[in-house]
Image: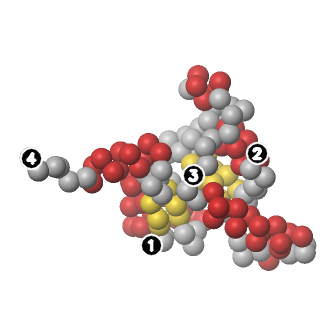
Amino acid sequence: MNNENDSEDIPLSEGPLKCFLEALANMEKKFNAKDLYKNCPVQTYLVTSRDPVITGTRALKTLKSWGLEITQAFFLSGRPKGPLLKMIRPHIFFDDQKPHIDGARELGITSAHVPYGIGYETYKGATEKPKKE
């Protein structure tokens, strides 16, 4: 946690879906520029297991440094994402951890695993076939 506090003002590295988020944000901006905010079909939510005070600040500052805005952010402090996903019913849900993907799929939510970060390394290691000697 000290590392996160020390790194609060250092943006997180760009993930593989940054370009996709930028495209969604640009579509949302076009609706907002025409005062159609309430009718905007694009809503972006950040649903993270991060703590809002300790690590959430860094996530929000990262998005701001990229010039990106999101509709809402939810910091779950380690609680399961399923109940919130059930409430907001996203069209698609991305996550870097397989258990969150599986939970969303059980709710009937289209989900995609993002091969990035520690969650991916753990998942990749669990799915790799042992090498034959």
Indicate whether 61 appears above or below 72.
Answer: above
In the rendered structure, find residue 108 and report the number of the disc placed on it. Answer: 1
Which residue has dot 4 on it?
133
Mark 4 vs mark 2: give the one in front.
4
Indicate whether 95 appears above or below 23.
Answer: above
Residue shown at 59% from the left, 38% from the top? 51
Local packing at callout 2 (Cα closer than 10 Å; few below 14, some 14-19, many 20+) is: few
Mark 1 vs mark 4: give the one in front.
4
Residue shown at 50% from the left, 42% from the top? 78
Discs 2, 1 touching: Cβ within 8 Å:
no
Residue shown at 76% from the left, 47% from the top? 64
Discs 2, 3 touching: Cβ within 8 Å:
no
Which residue has dot 3 on it?
15
Which residue has dot 2 on it?
65
Inspect the image, locate mark 4, and give the three-letter code of the amino acid beneath it: Glu
Is residue 124 found left or right of 67 in the rendered image? Answer: left
Residue 99 picture location, percent across and down? 38, 54
Q: Earlier in the sequence, mark 4 or mark 3?
A: 3
Inspect the image, locate mark 1, and give the three-letter code of the amino acid beneath it: Gly
